[in-house]
Each structure stands twice: as structure tokens, then as C-alpha cells.
Image (tube, coloured by chain):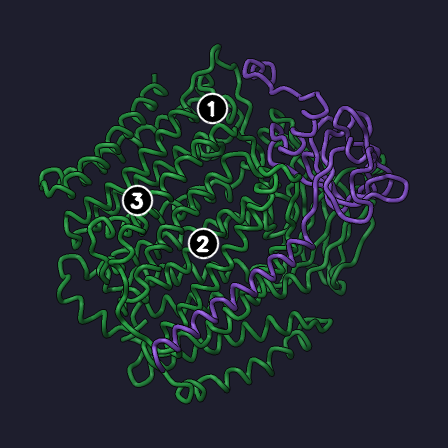
Amino acid sequence: MKARKKRFIVILVGLGALGLASWLVFNALGNNMSYFYSPTEVVQKKAPEDHLFRLGGMVVKGSIQRGQELTVRFAVTDTANVVNVEYTGILPDLFDEEQGVIAQGKLNSMGVFIASEVLAKHDEKYMPPEVADALEKAGNMKTDVPAAELQNDS
Amino acid sequence: MIPEIGQFALILGMVFALVQTVVPLAGAHFGIASWVAVAKPAARVQLLFVAISFIALSWSFLTHDFSVKYVAVNSNTALPTFYLLSAVWGAHEGSLVLWALVLSIWTTSVTVFSRSIPPVTLARVLGVMGFISVGFILFILVTSNPFERLVPAAMEGRDLNPLLQDIGLILHPPLLYMGYVGFVVPFSFAIAAMLGGHLDAAWARWSRPWTHVAWVFLTLGILLGSWWAYYELGWGGWWFWDPVENSSFIPWLVGTALMHSLAVTEKRGTFKAWTVLLAIFTFSLSLLGTFLVRSGVLTSVHAFASDPARGTFILIFLAVVVGGSLLIYSWRASQIRSYVHFDLLSRETGLLLNNVFFVVAAISILLGTLYPLIVDALGIGKISVGPPYFNSVFLPLMVPMVILLGIGPLLRWKRDSFSRIWPKIWLIAVISLVVGPLIPLLAMGPYEIRATFGMMLAIWVLGATLKSLFEQTRGRGFATVSRSFWGMILGHIGVAVFIVGITLTSVYSTEKDLRLDPGDSYELAGFKFQFDGTTKIIGKNYSGTKAKLTVTKNGKYIATMEPEKRNYRVQKQPLTEAAIDAGLFRDLFVALGEPLGSKGAWSVRIYHKPFLRWIWLGALIMALGGLFAASDRRYRKLAGRAKKQRAVTIEAVS
């Protein structure tokens, strides 16, 4: 086989693979992206009504209701507005009131956010950047714990 | 005093890294032998000082020196000694010191195993490694000093994150870093070769064993991370396509491509420019991985608290390293063209396609990982890309790749013909098409097309790999087979085992979140889980609840499972300690949720996961293959016998 023809075929295969990959990538991106909305944006009806999205904020103090079954209800706030969330299943260890949380799911017709997934985090100091941003926008950012408090902890 | 010694040693380490960069590179450039000779001792002294610094930090942990901020935040007097040491790399600052230490260990290893390398080349290699070291130590000293004092000193430490108090996390970071950082060696060899203008087969031969070893470490590191996430995070998943996981997987993919491409460059002298580029990208992606994990720009289920100022530093450093290497590359690229030709049907083409698939897969994962960051930076909105994206992009790319994997090793270098190959593979193809559907049909319960497909691929890989072993040994026996060839065989068998694992686990796993009262039972996949209630437990630095479940199958006792819910006293952090009954063919997994009501009921998560262990077993076999390849005789012979060597390598085809 001539070198030129060979090179042509190699380039063709390469372009084919690249084409396949880009088709896969854009197809998959379109279907599997979810946008992040703060409670304020949800209340202002900026969030989609029929598509999965992520809701983030702080869990409102005293809002966690556990029943006899697995469904848990709680409210998420960015300090300006509140959205009620319902989740059926086992919550991650670090889920607690007044902690940052990100939930993925959809709004139902009553305006309650039905979460299919609640995200965990690795340590109690961590604040998801989206949540930090949403809180900042709402004008009330929780400040970091100063190092001097270390002593009081123990 | 000890922390100050540690910090001072780190500064001295950087000074010697600087000497190791500037003097040998200048010496190599101007041809001054005495300057070239500085490289080795400078590298070893650098290791000495970085090691002193690391030991000083470990000492501060062992002696509970809470006047050191990093120790106060990540340790506690109640922490078991075992974890005091792993706490050293439990958080950002210390893990960077580990990074620097690992880098100097690799550098010093190069000085030890480099007798066959000309001093000038070695000086350039060590110079490049020294430059990376300067950058990293500077990063530690400027943005993340682990020896920073806390005034006044804390009375007691805040304790290590409970998730990290675990054997998996003691080993995971060092192994991962050995892998990440290990790719600095082929990178430095590539840059050194370009600086010197000699990009020949010798360069590839020097790089290969190092690349194999780094790859083995990275494979094991990822494996341990996956295993840890499975049993410790309490979710029962083994891979989440999480950005942090991706940032270790992307270098792995490109590193795998590099390993295969180096083979072609060594044996055939082709793909030179491409291999150099891969070496640059593998290490750059490792750096990018460090940046992504440590900068705090990612929203990840894995994310730890971190500081964006650090991100800026790594980003600049990354730009210097990638930009600098590409500049050298563009300056030299025209001189490293290959002149060896090969036919369309040849092993070269097979390996080229292997590279195309691995690199394209890496790029698409990189894209999915970075896309949310790009969108955010452009101010369009905040998005996240979920696991389905990665599955639907990665899997279709791997299928042709795996089919190719069977044929590749059977092909001849340079030229082959379809009529020679076809008789070797048709029977294996038929067997995999026939037996593939039988396994899910007969052994696995409900028939699933995805399982059939996965089994076909696994049998195909296994069959074709055994076939190439048979071809290699026919008439010659096993004694003549080189370790490098065994490495390939094991690596590919590992792939087959891995495919079985992910296919059957993904298709046939069942899970259930449910409420259980004491005395209740629930049946999942034929296993009956009986909840016998809970008891209180008290550990050294935690207290909690332990549940007891008795598992039976058709009335026969299988296991007693005791998942725990712990509360760590200092961090006030709850932790789910799942109970796992592991087996070669199935795992049972039980995790406790929360107490429900006042009568002792709990929410419980139960999993049945068939063939889960095969995923890690496959990765383990792959890593073993890497070790075999790295320990091939011809690399060991290299030392001092460079000439006689050449004949052997041409013979051994692998």
C-alpha cells in the first residue's frame, strides 16, 4: 500500500474517532447537565419545572422532619428565601441543620423540591462553592471559624 | 524547635533543588564537566533535607505538638498512633510535603539506577526534575506552610477527619502520589532528550521501566481509592465519576497510552514526536489533577476545605511547565520526525489506534470535568455534569478499543496480512459470540443484553490474549518468554477480569433502602437479612451504635453483619461504618441510616453486588503485569552493558 493512501486512511480513522467522540460528548452533555439554582432563584421561578436541577443552600434550623418511614423533609435557605425539600432514602453522614447542602432533583406541582440525591462532603469545614456563592449573593456569608476557637472545641 | 528545623530543612531542600536545576543544565549546555557532576550529589542532598522536613512534621504529630497549627487542626491526643502518622498527609499542607518527598525519592532513584545513561543526559534529566521540585517546595513555603505556629498553642487538637482514620486512606495518598509524581521521570527524560537533541530509541528504553513503575503505583492508588470509597463512604459505590476521581483517572489513561507508545518508539523507532508529547501531557495532567483537587474550584462529593489562593499558584506553575515544554517541543519537533514506515495492517497501527482511543477518552473525561468550571468562569451559570455523561461517552469508546486489544498483540510489526491473522482469531471470535450470551443466561438470573455484550468482550480479550501467549511459546516453551511479554499478557488478562467485574456488578446489583424494626427481616437476591437490634459501643475516640443482622440463604446461615454508626467526639462528626461480607462472586453490604421512632427501628441500606471484587482483582492483575514489564531483564542488563544489549532487544518482540 502506498504511503499516501495509508496516511489518508489513518487520518480518516482518526477523524472518524474524533467525530464519534464529539457526537457522544455533545449528546451526553446535553442530556446530563444539571444547572444550579439558589432558593431565591427557585422562588422567583427561574428554575426549570420539568428538568433536573441542583438546589443548594443551608438547611434551616429545626426544619428536619423524620417520620416513621424513610422520607425526610427539610427546608433549604440562602438566608433570603426558603424552599422545602423532600427526600426518600438514607442521607449522608454530614447532613445536618445549619450545614451547607446540595440536592439534585425536580420541583413538584406544589413547589416542593423532590430530591433524588443529596450530596455529601468530606469534612465539616467544607462549603460547596455554589452554596457559598448563593449565600454571598443573598448577602449573608457565614464566616470561617477563627483558629483561636480551636481551644474551645475540646 | 523541631518544627523550625523542619521548615529550615525544607528551605535548604529548595536551595539544593535550585542548584540541581541551574548548575547541571548550564553545565550540559556549555559543556562543563564539573558542573554536570553536581547533578547527582545535589539531588541526593535535596532528598536528605526534604526527608528531614517530613520526619520533623511526623515528629510533631507523634509528640502532639499542638503549637503547630497543622497538627492542632488534624490530630488529637486520643488518636491511635497508627493514624498519627497517616495524619501527616491527611490534609493539604502535609500531603504536599509528601508530594515533595515522593518527588525527591524518584529523583534520587534516577541517580541510583542510571549507570548506563551518559552523564550529560542525566544532568539534564535531573535538572528538569529539580525545576519541578523548586516549584513545589516554593508552593509549600509560600502558600501552605505545615510548620506554621499557632499562638497561643492549642490545649488539644481538633482530631483527624474520621473518614481518614482508616487503613485505606493511610496507603491511598502515598501510592497515588508515587504514581502521579512518577510520571515526572518520562517527562524529564523527554525534555532532556529534546534539549540534547538526541531523541533515539535509547531515550525510550530508559523511560520505559520508569513509566511502568509509575503506572503501577497510579493503578494501585486508584484501586485503593475506589475500595476505600466503597467501604468507608458508606454508599457502596466503587466509582462515582467524581471530579477528584477523574483527575487521577485522566493521567492514568494518558499514561497507559504513553506506556504503549513507548513500546513502539523503543522497538521500531517510530512515533517519536507523539511519544514525547504524551510524556509531556501525562505529567502535565498529573499536575492539573493536583491543581483540581487542591485548589477548591471543584464541587465534588470528595472535596475537602481548601484555599483558592493556592489554586492560582499551581495554575501559574502549570502554565510554566506545560507552556515551557511545548515551547521546547515546537523548537525541536522538526528534528524528531520518524523515518520508519509501516503498513496499515501492522502492530504499529494497532498501537496507534490504542493511543487514539485512550487519548480521546481522556479528553472527553477532561472535558466533562472542566466544563462546569469553564461555564462558571464565563458567567453563564453553575452546572454540574453527572455520571451518566461519563458512562455514555467512555463506554462506547472503550468497546472498539477492547476489540482491538485482542487483535493487536497477534499482529506483526511493520507488515501483516489479513489472511495470516484471520485463521488465528475466527475461532476465538465465534467462542466469545456463543459463550458470551450463555453466562448471563445460565448463571446470572434474568437475561440482560448488556451482560451478554460485556461477557463477549471479556471472553474475546481472554481468548485472544491466551492465543498470543500460545503463539509466543509454541515450539520454544515458557522459559524463553520475556518478562515484558508476561507483563503484556497479565495486563490484558487483568482487563478481561475487570470487564467481567464492572459488567456483572453494574447489571446485576440490587439495593434497597428500608426501615427495619428489631426482629424484622428482608429478602434481597435470595439472601434473608434479619435485623436483631442494636447495641451501644464505645471506641477510643468515638461512641456509637452497632446493629446486628443475621444473613441466611434458604435457611442456611451465611454471615452475621454488624454495621456501625459512630460519633467522633472531637470532630462531632457522624460516620457510617458499613458491614461487608465479601466474596469472590458476591458482596453483601449493609449500612445504617438513622434511628426511626423510639422503638429501636432504623433505616438501613442493603446491597447485593455480584462479582464486585473482580473489578479490583482485574486492576491488581494489571498492576502485576506492569511490575513484570518493568522488571524485564533487558532493563537490568542495561547497566554497564549497553552495547551487547541492542541485539537482545531486537529479538524480544513484545
Q: Which residue is mark 1?
A: B70
Mark whose residue sits in front, 3 or 2: 2
**Is residue B161 rendered to the left or right of residue B175?**
right
Amino acid type indicated by mark 2: Trp
Mark earlier in primary sequence (3, 1): 1
Residue A88 seen anywhere in this rendered image of the structure = no
CA distance for labels 3 and 2: 18 Å
**Is residue B41 rendered to the left or right of residue A62?**
left
Where, quadrant-wise, is the N terminus of chain B in this rendering? top left
Q: Which residue is mark 3?
A: B106
Mark earlier in primary sequence (2, 1): 1
Location of residue B77 in the rendering, given as x and y in whole percent from the top left corner: 51, 23
Name which residue lies at 38% across and 44% down: B322
Amino acid type indicated by mark 3: Trp
Question: Is circle 3 on the same chain as circle 1?
Answer: yes
Report the chain holding disc 1: B
Location of residue B33 in the rendering, given as x and y in whole percent from the top left corner: 9, 42
Report the chain holding disc 3: B
Label 1 neighbourhood size at 10 Å, few (<14), some (14-19), many (20+)?
many
Farthest residue to the right: give it: A110
The answer to whether marks 3 and 2 mark residues whose Cβ atoms lie closer than 8 Å is no
Label 3 neighbourhood size at 10 Å, few (<14), some (14-19), many (20+)?
many
Identify the hue of chain A. Answer: purple
Report the chain holding disc 2: B
Q: Which residue is mark 2?
A: B252
